[in-house]
Image (cartoon, rainbow, N blue to C red):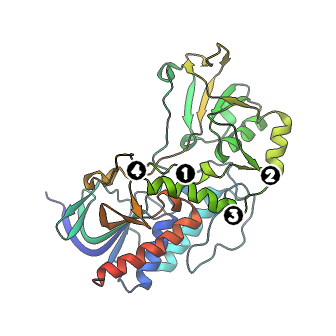
Amino acid sequence: MSPALATVDAVVVGAGQGGLAAAFFLERAGLEPGRGFVVLDADAEPGGAWRHRWPGLTMARVNGVHDLPGFPLGDVDPAAPAREVVPAYFAEYERRLGHPVRRPVRVLAVRSAGPRLLVDTGATRFAARAVVNATGTWTKPFWPHYPGREGFRGRQLHTADWAGPAEFAGRHVVVVGGGVSAVQHLAELAAAGAATTWVTRREPVFHEQFDVDARRAAVAVVAERVAAGEPPGSVVSATGLVLTPEVAALRESGVLKRHPAFARVLPDGVAWADGSVQQADAILWATGFRPAVHHLRPLRLREPGGGILVEGTRAVREPRLHLVGYGPSASTVGASRAAREAVRDVAALLAGR
């Protein structure tokens, strides 16, 4: 049977921070939910990527949760798990919006179909005049290539798979990655009685504080890459590490003793180019994520440098498509701002401007 065809003005793909903000602004712009626009989300319940964070990530340890437009998060228990607090906040936000997010609905492909974009979910195809893509990065964990990685006999896992340190008590874990997640994993592992080796490609940069100017500078680095048509990298990777009391204590204890990238993976550990070896029971890849944009491949958006060129949020090669949470807007603050900008352009497009 052929998929059902539904005609709408706009489709929002993803119901995380950016997608929910886009829904709010689309309704404010006069589009009718359900008929004028729809929001599609692949998860079975509200919460976006926050539903999948590890149990030890408390609200005190997250980089920040920006308020969704029109409904602030308010005061929360800093010791509460982020994967409980934020999904509950998103669920309440959806309830207040008053129209359902369609889930679980996975977008398989977005194609150009004359004057409209065709959003294919398998069961239904939505013919839309504009698409706001807010699919984030969590579903695309990045596993770097190292010679010998396939032959490692121990446990390999990514931050996306991290459920806590309990299984590693008394074992040696090599943690790869220079971001906040890697540091938090190291702290949890040390507290659980695991031995660790911290490996990063570059020397970590620690800041006494991460102020507005530093944040803007980090966003600018990612924006320059996107403007050049290169893969964006992440805002988080450009921010360095804030020297909180917890981080300072980890440095003092030796947990945050950094080792340079190893040359290859052995069946029972890792080896550096100088011949030194570290035996290991597990390798934890805290190596970040990449934009989840595989469903956009039929639009042929990639530049020679490998990235998608955007102006504001609008894809240069397909101006009916807006990318929210891509590149410089891949943060809770940036996603909400980008959603407002995207909807402003979508409203202008629908009005014929």
- Identify the amino acid type marked 3: Asp
- Identify the amino acid type marked 4: Gly
Marks 1/4: CA distance? 13 Å
Residue indicated by mark 2: 244
Characterize the local packing of mark 3: few (<14), some (14-19) or many (20 or more) Cα atoms within 10 angstroms. Answer: few
Q: Earlier in the sequence, mark 2 or mark 4?
A: 2
Up the image or down, 172 lies above or below 75; here it is: above
Residue indicated by mark 1: 234
Q: Earlier in the sequence, mark 2 or mark 3?
A: 3
Residue projecting furthest to the bottom: 30
Q: Earlier in the sequence, mark 1 or mark 2?
A: 1
Q: Name the residue: 49% across, 72% down.
A: 21
292 or 44, nearer to the observer: 292
SS label for mark 3:
helix
Q: Earlier in the sequence, mark 1 or mark 4?
A: 1
Locate the N terminus by quadrant. bottom left
SS label for mark 1:
loop
Q: Earlier in the sequence, mark 1 or mark 3?
A: 3
Characterize the local packing of mark 2: few (<14), some (14-19) or many (20 or more) Cα atoms within 10 angstroms. Answer: few
Q: Earlier in the sequence, mark 3 or mark 4?
A: 3
Locate the C terminus by quadrant. bottom left
308 or 164, nearer to the observer: 308
Contact flag, marks 2 and 3 (Cβ < 8 Å): no
- Identify the amino acid type marked 1: Ser
Contact flag, marks 1 and 3 (Cβ < 8 Å): no
Up the image or down, 33 lies above or below 293; here it is: below
Marks 3/4: CA distance? 26 Å
Residue projecting furthest to the left: 1
Badge nearest the viewer, 1 or 4: 4
- From the viewer's perspective, tell me whether residue 274 is left or right of residue 352: right
The picture places residue 265, in percent across and down from the top left corner, at: 55, 20
